[in-house]
Image (cartoon, rainbow, N blue to C red):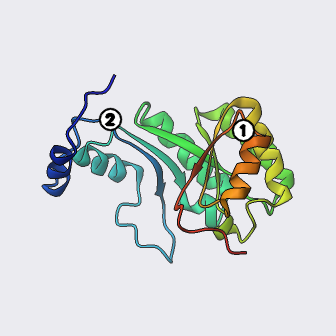
Amino acid sequence: MSIPVHPDRFARSVLRGLPLSEVRVVDCHAHVGHNASLHIPETGVAEMIAAADRLGIEMLCLSALEAIFADYRTGNERIARAMLEYPGRVRGYVVVNPHYPEDILPEIERCFAAAPFIGLKFHPAGHEYPPDGPAYEAALGYAHEHGLVVLSHNWGSADYLDRVSQRYPRAHFIQAHSAAAWRG
């Protein structure tokens, strides 16, 4: 049970740079690693944990940038190691790459056997692949079957997310960057 916090008190803490100790805070969309087009000052898991401690963030739900932009296996392995090194502080998303549809289910199964991932991460913009493309069907079916979270960098139109959530009702969908719809 959470303790009600007056919004002004919460805002004062944030504006003063104090940890958010009066509420439970989970960062459900964070990245580790490097990408040439993004400035991320703290790229390692240990640095992210230290920043989370300063801010009062209880848990980080991570995906690796290299999994999105370069090598999904290596990036997913990095997140699996982080979850095992920081149990209870780090949870992870398996990044799937729709350009390798034959690898999607084996990669998901490999990752879930290795560590306690919480769900899947799609990145339609990074992969230059539409969120309603057929290569995502196997991953969505797996998420539905196992009641997993599916975080997408964006889903495109609200109509699409409505349709996919009705087709896979046991999956849980997170729309990241909701103002940035897919423009394929």
- Which comes sooner in the sequence, label 1 or label 2? 2
Q: Residue 143 carries which label?
A: 1
Q: Disc 2 designates what residue? A: 24
Image position of 69 (left or right of 165): left
Q: Is residue 37 above or below residue 105?
A: below
Q: In which quarter of the image is residue 156?
A: bottom right
**Neighbour class for label 1 at 10 Å: few (<14), some, many (≥20)?**
many
- Amino acid type, residue under disc 2 in the picture: Arg
Q: Nearer the viewer, residue 73 or 179?
A: 179
Q: CB atoms at circles 1 and 2 under 8 Å apart?
A: no
The quarter of the picture where the N terminus appears is top left
**Residue shown at the point (75%, 66%) measured from the top left:** 130
Indicate the position of residue 124 as horizontal and vertical percent values. Answer: 68, 65
Residue 120's spot in the image, x, y percent? 65, 46
| Rendered position, 2 above or below 26 | above
Q: Residue most toward the top?
A: 1
Mark 1 is on which residue type? Ala
Q: Which mark is residue 172?
A: none
